Each structure stands twice: as structure tokens, then as C-alpha cells.
Image (cartoon, grey):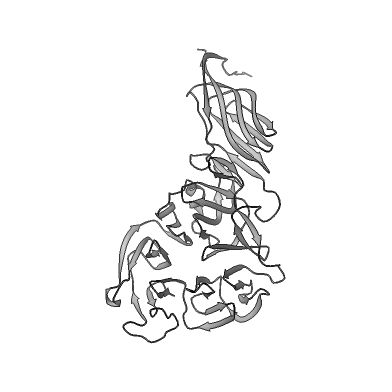
Amino acid sequence: MIFYEKSAAQYSSYKKRMRIPLEGGESEGGYLQNFCLRDGYLGGGVGSEQVTDGSVQISALFCVGGAIAGYAPSGKLCVGSALADAGFAFTGIPDCVALPDGDGMLLSDGQTCVSVTSAGANKLTLPFRTAVFAYGRLWRTSDGVRLYYGALDDYKEAAVGRGKTGYIDSPDAKGKILRLFFVKNEILVLREYGLQKLVAHGDEEEFAFEDILSCAAVNGGSAAATQNALFWLTAEGFRVWGDAKVNGYSQFFAPHVSSDSVRGAACGDRYFLQSQYTLPDGTVAEGLGVFDAQGGGYLIPQKAEGLVSVQNGVFFTHGGKGYTVTEKGNFLGGIAHRVWQSAPTQPFGCRALLMEVCVRSKGPFLLQIKSDEGSRALCFAGGLCRKRVLLAGTVFSFRVQAEECELYALSAVFQRGEDKV
């Protein structure tokens, strides 16, 4: 048997201190779980608040003003704080559009349409798969080809004619209409293979579609809009229109674009995506991606089923109970297990010695450091602290595991190595 031993390294006097970027997903190999990068440091992200008590099991929750609606696993529509059976049923989780007065909503599965307000629920003859209120009209489509528009300032008006209701037949090479949005004072039409805007000012005979972009196959369930940007997932990754950056996490989610469980939502300047994802080490999991308009983001490895956005709120279910996303706090209760994984760091392009690390944090955490030649695990109690490492290698990666912790800075001192020949 022949044994081989790694050549010993001589280390020059050249040293350098490197700041290890705390961003996750910005570079290949880095990611965040339950850690949010905000104002330059890692801390807790969004939380959730339970809305229903679970006495009535639901698969989706919708709240607008004083109106509450739940979609039951049986397909029944439940309304009010007690989630009483409203006597209507849907074939799947319905699409929802908030009423202009802010105290109610329209729910439809493309066949049945129900108006839900704080006073109760009523059936309307306005079926849609997707709809939006814009320019004083209700715009809706059931088949993705014929786009109906309502009368000005009266969405219940049924009379057809100039100045009242009508429709536009809109077959297009980009495919059928999947979603409608109103962003930055524009009606956006997301189709199977691209994005258009609807020019709909003035006379109905002048309504027209204008192309914005073409893209790979679109997952319509993933699309959601903030006030200033539209986010959606394609077979090739994220796409964004408006005042936002494409997030580096698209590589994690793109392979699962065909999944029926993919759902998107948005509020404030955040976009939420419920789907399967693949981590850089090949691990496949299902959970919630939370992304901001500046291109940052992180993962929550817990399911947010029936994810929807209504007005400026995001709602979901878990275990049959309804929840709303909150700005801060614990997500689905309990203490979250937080993980930060850095992108690979190659300090010199040759062998090096990681001499020490310096961290500034609040709360305890475990720092794991790996190189192509070994690994180290260090415990920190919080505050400003330096620790010797003495780990040789060419490429290094850093991983933090914590519960209640905030990480403000991480730096490392490397000494250049010179291999013997």
C-alpha cells in the first residue's frame, strides 16, 4: 500500500484581514435561513400572527377591512370571524381582488364569483381566474383570452355598450393571460411567455396591448406585485419588472417552476415565494422565500400553505389555521433555527493559513469553518471577540448556526502560503 501526504506549506510574512460579506444568495454557494440582512447586519426576519383559532380547518385565508373569508379543504367558502359556511363552493383556491372601498373582496375560481363584505357573502355573475381594479373599472378574464372590463365606477353594472361594460378578445403569441396587476399606474398583463401592459385610457375602442418583454415559461401562481414592482418565476429563474432587483435566489427555485404548489405574494417592498428549492449542496426542501426589492433575501424552511396577498397583507395557512405575516417576531411560533452560509472565500489563490477570526454579535452562536483541508467549530457568547483558528486550505467557507442571535460583522486574518516543490 502506498500512502500520500499533502506537501507541507511554508507561510510568508504576508497577511491580510478580509471582511466576510454577510449577504446570502448574492454569490454562488451562500444562503440564509431565518436570518434577514437588514441595515448591514443579520437578525430576525418576518414573523406571523394567528388569525383563526383552528376550530374550522381552512386551506386559504383572505382578509380585507372587516371582511374575513376562508377556503375550506372541501371547497366550501367560510366567512366572518367564526368562519361560518356561506353556502358557496369553489373548485380550488380562488383568486381574490379587494373592493375599491377597502371593505370587502371578490373571490372567484373562474366559474363562481362571490362578493364578501363585513355584512356577508353574495353571489355575482362576474367569474374570473384573475382580475384587477384599475382606472375605475374591474378588469377580469376566465379563459385567458377574452378580457372583460366593467363600467366606470360601477363594477356590478351588467349593461353592454360604450361607456359601460365590454370585452377585448386578446389572443397573442405570448400565450394566454395568467395574471393581471396594477403597478406604477399601469395595468400589467402577465402571459404564459411574457409581459405586456394594457393601454386603457379614454375611449374603449382605443384600448390596446403593448409588449414589454418575452421570457421563458411563466408560473402564474408565483406572480405577485408590490406598489412599484412585479415579481414572477420562470423556467429560467426570477424575472422582475419595475423598481426592484432580480434576486440571486432564482437558482434555488427555478427547477421547480412546474410545481402546482408554487405560490407568490407581496406586501410592502417584499416578495414571498412558497415552493420547493434546492440548496447549493444539493439538498431539496420546501419552504418560504422572502425577498426584498433591493435584491436581498432569505429562506424560511417551513411551509406557508395557501399563500395569498390581499391589499397590503400576506396571509397563509398551516395545520388548517389561518395566519398573517408580520413585520417582526417569530414565524409560526417558537424559536427559529437560524443559519447563515457564506459563499466560498479564496484569499490568495494558493494555500493559506486562516489564523484568526473576529466577530461582533449579540447572542450566542456556533461558527463552523471549512476548507479543502479540514474544518473547525467555534462557540461565541456574543459581543466583540477574537479567536485563533489555524486552519490551512485554499478555499474557505463560513457557517453560522444560532437561535436568538444578531451578527453584525465577521472578519478573518489569512497568511499566505507557499507550497514546497
Does residue 313 appear left or right of residue 405 in this picture?
Answer: left
Does residue 262 appear left or right of residue 217 in this picture?
Answer: right
Q: Quadrant of the N terminus?
A: top right
Q: For this rendering, which residue is in front, 205 or 129?
A: 205
Q: Quadrant of residue 184?
A: bottom left
Q: Is residue 150 above or below residue 266?
A: below
> Is any atom of residue 157 visible in this view?
yes
> Is any atom of residue 282 visible in this view?
no
Residue 370 appears at what percent x and percent y?
Answer: 60, 30
Which residue is found at the position 66% from the left and 73% from the top? 81
Q: Is residue 153 above or below residue 409?
A: below
Residue 10 appears at what percent x and percent y?
Answer: 55, 13
| Furthest-front residue in this view | 101
Does residue 412 appear left or right of residue 363 in this picture?
Answer: left
Which residue is found at the position 53% from the left and 56% from the top? 273
Residue 373 appears at what percent x and percent y?
Answer: 59, 25
Does residue 83 appear left or right of residue 99 in this picture?
Answer: right
| Furthest-left residue in this view | 206
Q: For this rendering, which residue is in front, 404 or 188?
A: 404
Residue 284 appears at what percent x and percent y?
Answer: 58, 49
Task: Give the mark count.
Answer: 0
